[in-house]
Image (cartoon, helix red, strand yellow):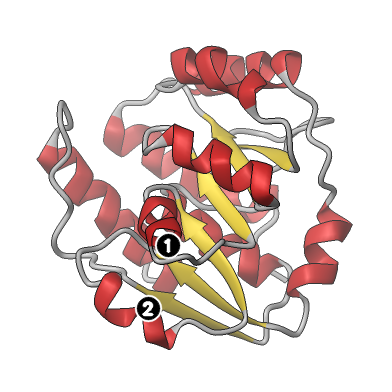
Amino acid sequence: MGMNWQEWKPIYEKILQEFGYDRKKDEEAARIAVKIAKGNVLPEDLGKMLNGKVVSICGAGENLEKELNEIEGIIIAADEATTILLSNNILPDIITTDLDGNVNDIIKANEKGSIVIIHAHGDNINALKKYLSCFKGKIMLTTQAEPFNGIYNFGGFTDGDRAYCIAKHFNAKKIKLIGFNFDKPKQKERKDLEAKKKKLEWAKKIIFGNF
């Protein structure tokens, strides 16, 4: 099995310390998310989908388009990878997002049947208030703080490594990383590139277990 809360907690505490995040804000975001929307996907639903399967996790690196032919099995898209997949007529089975990519594309994929696993944290409270009620398909809510009724935590920090933790937690037979580039973050408007680099370093640590 992948990470449970007790295993994730010490890693989460290191992340809080390194980035200066406020645990109370993460907890507040989780409470707000649960008030706005009720997840309709249960862990056992993910278990049925992922247990014993090959899972391809698609990141939004510049190499994703070149690696599309490597995709097999169940497809999990990390946030912005959804846009690239849809533009190539590929509908992800699952999307992990904290709602900072192209949310309209993620809503569109959700309408077509993608399960969207929406992450609540201290920095995306406004996005949760703006978009969460727009998802009418299958959703699950996650937190990086302590989980409670209606919101889950399978481990993971960024959309990509959270997808990995989910696949691992539900005993995927094989996990393929497609379109991941840990060394070269994609430039985003209004985003701090240095912070993004640090996040990718953590994503790498979480996926490869180098703490």
Marks 2/1 in contact by CB < 8 Å: the verdict is: yes
- Would you say 111 lies left or right of 26 here? right
Residue 1, how many percent across, how many down?
73, 71
Q: Which is nearer the eye, 159 or 157?
A: 159
Q: Residue at x 83, y 39 (%)?
A: 40
Residue 42, how many percent across, how many down?
85, 48
Mark 1 nearby-residue class (10 Å; few <14, some 14–19, many ≥20): some
Residue 165, how many percent across, how many down?
57, 62
Mark 2 nearby-residue class (10 Å; few <14, some 14–19, many ≥20): some
Whether residue 206 is visible: yes
- Would you say 86 lies left or right of 34 here? left
Residue 181 appears in which quarter of the rendering? bottom left
First in sequence: mark 2 or mark 1? 2
Q: Residue at x 59, y 14 (%)?
A: 28
User: How many angstroms separate mark 2 from mark 1 (CA)?
Assistant: 8 Å
Q: Residue at x 18, y 32 (%)?
A: 191
Write down the residue under mark 1.
85
Where does the C terminus fall, quadrant-wise? bottom left
Residue 127 against residue 121 in the figure, above or below: above
Residue 139 against residue 89 in the figure, above or below: above
Q: Which is nearer the eye, 94 or 6?
A: 94
Residue 133, how many percent across, how many down?
66, 19
Residue 180 appears in which quarter of the rendering? bottom left
Residue 14 against residue 69 in the figure, above or below: above
The circle drawn on residue 68 is 2
Amino acid carrying mark 1 in the image: Leu
